[in-house]
Every structure is written in C-alpha cells, then in structure tokens.
Amino acid sequence: MTDDIKTLQLDTSTMEVEIPLSLKGGVYANTITVTSTNSEITLNFIYVNPNDKPVGTLVSRVIVPIDFVNNLATIMTSLKRQIKEMGEKLHG
C-alpha cells in the first residue's frame, strides 16, 4: 500500500482541515458523472439549470485512487441511513 492510500484511512475526527475561502460556501450540483481507469475514479459534479438544458456547468471534479471505492461504499451507506432518518422525522 502506498503512503497516499494509507492517508485515506486516517481518523479525520482529530485532524484539522483548512478550508480555502473559495470553498467555504460549497457548490451546488444536481448531476454527477463517474468515470474510472485502472487506477483512479473521477467524479464530475455538474449543475444543470432546468431553463438552460442541455447545457451543464462543471462545478467540481474529484479524482480519487481506485482503492477509495471502499470509502465511497461507506459514504453511500451513511447517506442512505441519514436520508431514511430525515424521512422518518418529516413523516413522523
């Protein structure tokens, strides 16, 4: 395992993360594309204005090592749980 991949497994709850001013507000995307090679996965987050279809604007591109797939599966599991909990709160 390379040092880059080992850093993906750090406990980020104790890590200080600096957020550049340009990223503090985040970005809004309503579409995502995913492509991959043997070594990397590329996530393109795109905003498509319903009035401007079919034109979209790339708002963020994230490229991760292929070994990050395990982290993505964990993220998806967490998101599904959070969405379920939000639905339960909304619908009593």
Image: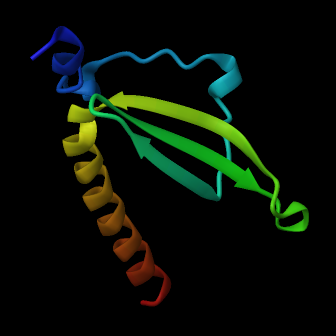
Q: x, y (%) of residue 90?
A: 49, 82
Visible residue check, residue 26 = no
> Looking at the image, which residue is at 55% across and 53% down?
32
Relative to 38, is 63 on the left or the right?
right
Quarter holding the C terminus?
bottom left
Q: x, y (%) of residue 2?
A: 15, 12
> Looking at the image, which residue is at 42% across and 18% down?
17
Give whichever of 53, 10 is nearer the camera: 53
> Looking at the image, which residue is at 33% across and 67% down?
80
Quarter holding the N terminus?
top left
Toward the left, the furthest residue is: 1
Q: x, y (%) of residue 47?
A: 72, 51
Toward the front, the furthest residue is: 38
Relative to 8, is 40 on the left or the right?
right
Give whichever of 26, 73 is nearer the camera: 73
> Looking at the image, which residue is at 64% across and 28% down?
24
Relative to 36, is 72 on the left or the right?
left
